[in-house]
Image: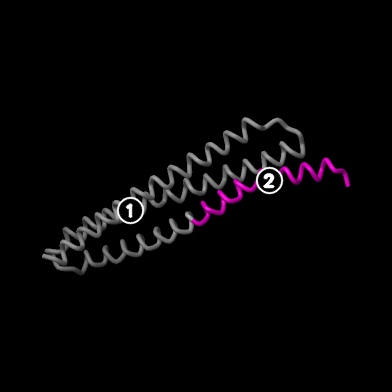
Amino acid sequence: MDTSHIESFTRLIQLSVVPAVLISGVGLLLLSFTNRLGRAIDRSRLLAREIQTGAPEEKEDLKKQLLIFFRRTELLRLCIVFSALSIFFCSAMLIGLFFLLFMGWAFQSLILFLFFISIVFLTLSVSFFLWDLFLTLKACKIEIKKQLA
């Protein structure tokens, strides 16, 4: 076997470690985001039923909470989209690395750009996640005030 192919393969493995770890980490975040989205949707459905069957004096607080949960589902959807895009661009970067090392195509600038875009989408995803956390606390605050009154 040609040693240049072995060296190219070894180099590909070395260069693939960071993107592979990034894909794995973002995948775990994606799992967390989808779980949170499912819970927010389930809670929204319960709140909608409570609005229909609840006491009139509770309906205003329930509607506020429902609007917050709707906004949370929108934010979590964005988290999921940006995480998936981060994985997509990181995967495209790995494909670019393959072409760079085995085909000799000069994709260095494109590979760096794909990595940069992947990190930008990851940052956006985590930013929307933080926003979701603040909204979660806002909905919780409404519920606590209702219980303490």
Find out whether residue 97 is within the magenta segment: no
The vertical placement of 72 against 7, above or below, is below
Quadrant of the drawing holding the C terminus: bottom left
The vertical placement of 51 against 95, above or below, is below
Pointers 2 and 1 in contact (C-beta within 8 Å): no
Q: Nearer the viewer, residue 89 or 14?
A: 14
Residue type, label 2: Gln
Residue at position x 14%, y 68% from top?
55
Q: Which mark identifies residue 133?
A: 1
Q: Is residue 15 left or right of residue 69?
A: right
Q: Which mark identifies residue 14?
A: 2
The x and y percentages for residue 68 are 27, 53
Residue at position x 19%, y 63% from top?
144
Q: CA distance from mark 2 to mark 1?
A: 37 Å
Figure quadrant of residue 145: bottom left
Which segment is the magenta one?
A: 1-28
Residue at position x 37%, y 63% from top?
39
Residue at position x 26%, y 57% from top?
66
Figure quadrant of residue 90: top right
Q: Is disc 2 surrounded by few (<14), some (14 to 19) or many (20+) residues within 10 Å? A: few
The x and y percentages for residue 83 are 49, 48
Q: Nearer the viewer, residue 84 or 90?
A: 90
Badge 2 marks a residue whose secondary structure is: helix
Q: Is residue 2 left or right of residue 68?
A: right
